[in-house]
Amino acid sequence: MLRFALLGAGRIGRMHADNLARHTGAELACVYDVAEAAARQVADKHGARVADTVDAALSGDVDAVLIASSTDTHVDLIEAAAARGKAILCEKPIDLSIERVEACREKIAGTDVPVMVGFNRRFDPTHRAVRDAAAAGEIGTIEQVVISSRDPGPPPRAYLEVCGGLFRDMMIHDFDLARFVLGEEPVEVTALGSALFDANARDLGDIDSGMVLMRTESGKLAHVNCSRRAVYGYDQRLEIHGSEGMLRSGNRRATEMDRWSKSATACREPLLDFFIERYADAYVAEIDEFLAAVSEGRAPSVGFEDGRRALLLADAALESLKTGKTVRV
């Protein structure tokens, strides 16, 4: 039984708390949030204690931390947990600054604690089945990867002011997924972006729509397209094209029922609302992987270096957008 301290009791922290509480191999022992009322609500629900400081959360018989706080706190919390020998599962991104990520990597290098970054899309059952089939050679040599990722609507201005922009906040998941399915590191990045509909993004110098092309050293190509608006629901699709065929992971719905009537042919259920609903299974599988890695004494399958490399791609995309040039990674 791995005893967890949850750092951050907002929307995604509450979801993680529920998953930890349901898991037979985990126990939610402690909750900390700068908003004590939020921490208390989560802790009371699951019979955990409330910590009034980070130090208090990391003390005692806690074995691991799940970091679900704001991005600007991640590095400090990773370093604090690593110094105390706690296993770490941290939401993405590690930080918005690659310099801070590099410094953190150096600081925790000698601590020998497992660090896992929450790129949950790797653990989506259908995404993973598609990737595993491609890796097994089912479609021959991988040639192209296409990822479509569209949110149901733009976030509030307060979120946009601190999230780091579309590439570092939203598309960073897709950069990691592209690396995961390509099996090679992208070495060239070309990006385009526009603020087509969100006045807040436009005012802040951000974009609400982006497309990125990437190429690996061997010539494999990846295309990622993102939008912060999809009026039909949360749109998440992955396609891998190879020399012997194609594999596709499509959208999820509440049910797979089709309706047939005089007015509609094969009218299907609407798409799921957003990421917590769409990737519910993936978040559980993510916890499974973290617990397995800790119990087996091995590195998690998606670690600190994966978080670092995804941010490098996001930074390259931002540089390409600003300069209008292809950026070598």
Image: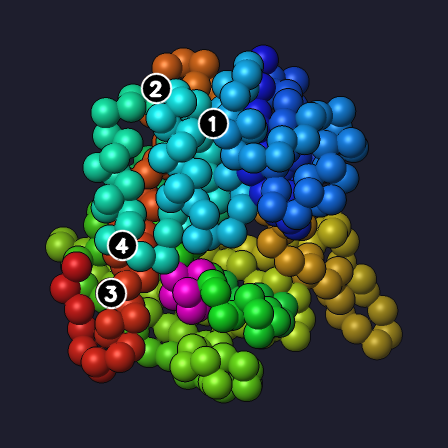
The residue under label 4 is 98
Mark 3 vs 4, N-terminal side: 4
Q: Secondary structure at mark 2?
A: loop
Quarter of the image with the N terminus is top right
The residue under label 1 is 290
- State whether residue 325 is above or below residue 297: below
Q: Rounded to the nearest whole Å, what is the CA distance between mark 1 and mark 2?
A: 10 Å
In percent of width and height, residue 161 lies at 49, 70
Q: Secondary structure at mark 3?
A: helix
Q: Who is closer to the viewer here, 305 or 261?
A: 305
Q: Judge whether residue 166 is colored magenta.
A: yes
Is residue 247 visible in this depiction of the protein? Answer: no
Is residue 6 visible in this depiction of the protein? Answer: yes
- State whether residue 327 is above or below residue 244: below
Q: What range of the chain is rendered magenta?
A: 164-169
Q: Is residue 174 left or right of residue 317?
A: right
Residue type indicated by callout 2: Arg
The residue under label 3 is 316
In percent of width and height, residue 147 lies at 42, 61
Do callouts 2 and 4 mark residues in contact (Cβ within 8 Å)? no
Query: Where, by quadrant of the figure, is residue 38 drawn?
Result: top right
Do callouts 3 and 4 mark residues in contact (Cβ within 8 Å)? no
